[in-house]
Amino acid sequence: MLLALAGCAAPPPARVAAPAPPAAAPAPPPTLATRVRREAWLTRFWEELTPAQRRRVLARMRRGPTPLARTEAEAAPAWDGLGLPERNELVFGTAAPRRATSD
């Protein structure tokens, strides 16, 4: 008799999906010091860059309404004259967060 009743049992209640966790806030951009540790090639002169790095930099220099350089011959002195913050901005497109200064 128990076997006959076992087949007639009500189905288990439907499971309710747990609510999705809230979306995490985007990570802040790395500081310039962190970027230089990860991408040490930013500190190198043009002649020390690999061909792939040169192509990457030259492609970035060609962008925008007023390109910084159109050829490798123009890019070399432009790259060597940039400071680290400018190189970071050029290659990664985001400025490093600036430290608050006390006036």
Image (tube, rainbow, N blue to C red):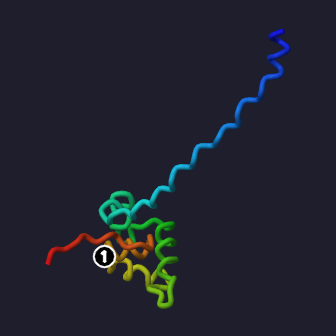
Query: Is 64 displayed left or right of 18 in the figure?
Result: left
* Image quarter of residue 86: bottom left
**Residue 71 or 24: which is nearer the viewer?**
24
- The residue lying at 39 percent from left, 63 percent from top is 28
Pinpoint residue 43: horizontal percent, then vertical percent: 33, 67
Query: Is 4 displayed left or right of 97 in the figure?
Result: right
Pinpoint residue 39: horizontal percent, then vertical percent: 39, 61
Q: State how many labels appear.
A: 1
Quadrant that contains the C terminus:
bottom left
**Residue 49 or 29: which is nearer the viewer?**
29
Residue 13, above or below 22:
above
- The residue lying at 37 percent from left, 67 percent from top is 42
Residue 34, above or below 91:
above
Residue to which mark 1 is pinned? 83
Query: Is 101 displayed left or right of 64 in the figure?
Result: left
Pinpoint residue 100: horizontal percent, then vertical percent: 23, 71
* Image quarter of residue 40: bottom left
**Residue 30 or 91: which is nearer the viewer?**
30
Secondary element type, mark 1: loop
Identify residue type, mark 1. Answer: Gly
Q: Farthest residue in the top direction?
A: 1
- The residue lying at 84 percent from left, 9 percent from top is 1
Pinpoint residue 74: horizontal percent, then vertical percent: 44, 85
Residue 2, above or below 97:
above
Q: Farthest residue in the bottom direction?
A: 66
- The residue lying at 33 percent from left, 58 percent from top is 37
Residue 35, above or below 6:
below
The crowding category of the residue bearing disc 1, from other C-alpha atoms within 10 Å (few below 14, some 14 to 19, many at least 20), is few
